[in-house]
Image (cartoon, rainbow, N blue to C red):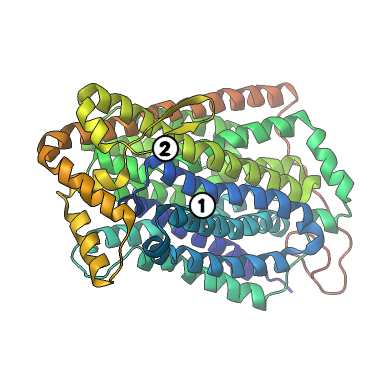
């Protein structure tokens, strides 16, 4: 029984769901900042928390995937995806009844649970596809991970439609576009319930758990894990912010640029096989990292629309092959590692994006925007700075710009008036809205003179954050180059293939011979 196709489609749909949720979340970050009063750092921590949950779960789930099996883990992921939507949608009622801090934790937990579901999926689909197609792992893993930019495209389009309609359609809230990720979730859930799954490639080959763990003694694998941490920072960490930053540079075009970059990824990942046949996977990774570094620096440097689009093109070309090709390299060089090595790669990448990428890029925006606004107008900074300080790692604590205040300024107080009017209709009061109303009464007389420096500071912060991030793929390119030279000294890059046990009855596992579950 060959059920490769439906299993591959289910795996593909898990990434569509993850990409849709990720893209729409990026498109509504400004709504969260305006509605709930979060700073860039707050928002970065919320999105980062989701990635952290993703990373932890991949690491833990990968330890048991080969023994527990693919199907039970994917069923649990399906349940958690649905529950994460319900918790996230509770944010506005909680804000009305319990305030900003409780809302922060509601969104954080919702994103964390969404990420847990994504992590469970990721722990399964990479070794599953490697099992289904053991002789073309890099090619099919790239096709599989075209589902991620595919989801980003769908989510970006939905977010763009929402952005264009929310001011003209009464009652249209961020919860509506956010619910779209449930559609691919239901599709993969139906397939998982219906289909039978193969045993893993490593388990079919009789590789023990101890042998899987022994792969981590390899210096090469350790080096690849460090490089994957950089991949997570530069790809997912940047993707958390890229639509918001480019929208400040080219007003109204941020989501379109995001969709465009995702479309580049979606198309090119279907052609990874022919590219890898011409240059080995490490050579492809080295070239990709160079493009990524140049693209990020260009986005942070250019102001003209045409050059920003060119810069995003270069950036899109750079990040296209990084994540799936890294998984392919580990699958090809360390097949005995099974789901554990695949999970370690995904987990390290997600943890880096969540703990460093999202918050770090958010902090850099706050840091440079604060510096710029204090330089341009110290008085405006005092009016629009947040109440609390935030720090990142060993960097100094700073007071970033309050998202609600900046939103009110950019909309001439309309957001505040609409929010207060809505609360009055619901016969509810909120201390935060009251204090914001009081603040606007004092800030409104200076709005005309404050708007230009506040806008300029925000744009400057985003640009500088991307320029700083460009250093990461530059370091990656150097690391990949060293690995290319290492394999050249060893006679070239070679793929290791595990062969399974003899077939049992008429059962077929996909790419290898062995039993199904």
**Label 2 neighbour load within 10 Å: few <14, some 14-19, many 20+:** many
Per the image, label 1 sits on a secondary structure element best described as helix
Vertical order, 444 against 507 (above or below): above
**Residue 231 placement, left or right of 315:** right
Position of residue 486 measured from the top left corner of the image (x, y, whole percent): 70, 23
User: If the image is split into quadrants, where does the N terminus sit?
Assistant: bottom right
**Residue 118 placement, left or right of 28:** right
Q: Mark 1 = which residue?
A: 270
- Spatial separation of the CA atoms under disc 2 and disc 1: 32 Å
The residue that appears at 27% across and 29% down in the rendered structure is 302
Q: Judge whether residue 65 can be spotted in this image.
A: yes
Q: Mark 2 = which residue?
A: 362
**Along the viewing direction, whichever of 184 and 55 lies nearer the viewer:** 55
Q: Residue furthest bottom?
A: 194
The residue that appears at 65% across and 48% down in the rendered structure is 56
Q: Judge whether residue 280 can be spotted in this image.
A: no
């Amino acid at each position: 029984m060959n059920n490769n196709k439906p299993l591959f489609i289910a795996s593909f749909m898990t990434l569509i769901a993850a990409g849709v949720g990720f893209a729409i979340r990026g498109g509504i970050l400004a709504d969260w900042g305006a509605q709930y009063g979060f700073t860039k750092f707050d928002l970065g921590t919320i999105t980062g928390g989701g990635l952290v949950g993703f990373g932890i779960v991949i690491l833990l789930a990968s330890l048991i995937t080969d023994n527990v099996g693919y199907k039970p883990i994917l069923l649990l992921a399906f349940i958690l995806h649905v529950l994460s939507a319900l918790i996230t949608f509770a944010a506005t009622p909680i804000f009305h009844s319990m305030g900003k801090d409780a809302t922060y934790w509601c969104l954080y937990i919702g994103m964390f649970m969404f990420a847990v579901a994504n992590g469970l999926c990721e722990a399964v689909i990479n070794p599953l596809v490697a099992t289904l197609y053991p002789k073309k792992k890099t090619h099919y893993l790239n096709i599989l991970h075209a589902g991620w930019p595919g989801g980003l495209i769908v989510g970006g389009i939905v977010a763009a439609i929402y952005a264009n309609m929310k001011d003209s359609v009464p009652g249209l809230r961020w919860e509506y576009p956010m619910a779209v990720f449930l559609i691919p979730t239901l599709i993969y859930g139906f397939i998982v319930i219906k289909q039978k799954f193969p045993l893993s490639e490593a388990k079919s080959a009789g590789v023990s758990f101890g042998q899987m763990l022994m792969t981590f003694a390899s210096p090469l694998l350790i080096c690849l894990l460090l490089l994957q941490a950089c991949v997570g920072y530069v790809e997912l960490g940047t993707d958390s912010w890229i639509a918001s930053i480019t929208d400040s540079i080219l007003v109204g075009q941020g989501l379109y640029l995001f969709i465009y970059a995702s479309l580049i990824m979606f198309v090119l990942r279907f052609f990874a096989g022919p590219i890898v046949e011409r240059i080995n996977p490490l050579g492809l990774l080295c070239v990709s990292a160079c493009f990524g570094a140049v693209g990020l620096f260009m986005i942070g440097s250019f102001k003209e629309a045409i050059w920003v689009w060119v810069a995003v093109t270069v950036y899109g070309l750079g990040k296209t092959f990084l994540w799936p090709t890294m998984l392919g390299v580990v699958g090809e060089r360390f097949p005995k590692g099974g789901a554990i090595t695949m999970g370690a790669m995904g987990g390290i990448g997600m943890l880096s994006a969540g703990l460093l990428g999202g918050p770090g890029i958010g902090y850099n925006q706050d840091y440079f925007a604060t510096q710029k606004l204090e330089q341009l107008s110290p008085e405006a900074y005092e009016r629009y700075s947040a109440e609390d300080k935030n720090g990142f790692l060993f960097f100094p604590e700073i007071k970033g710009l309050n998202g609600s205040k900046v939103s009110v300024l950019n909309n001439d107080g309309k957001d505040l008036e609409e929010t207060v009017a809505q609360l009055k209709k619901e016969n509810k009061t909120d201390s935060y809205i009251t204090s914001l109303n009081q603040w606007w009464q004092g800030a409104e007389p200076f709005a005309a003179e404050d708007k230009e420096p506040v806008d300029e500071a925000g744009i400057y912060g985003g640009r500088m954050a991307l320029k700083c991030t460009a250093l990461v793929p530059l370091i990656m390119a150097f690391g990949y180059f060293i690995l290319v030279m290492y394999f050249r000294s060893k006679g070239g890059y070679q793929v290791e293939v595990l062969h399974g046990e003899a077939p049992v009855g008429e059962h077929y596992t996909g790419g290898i011979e062995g039993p199904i579950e």
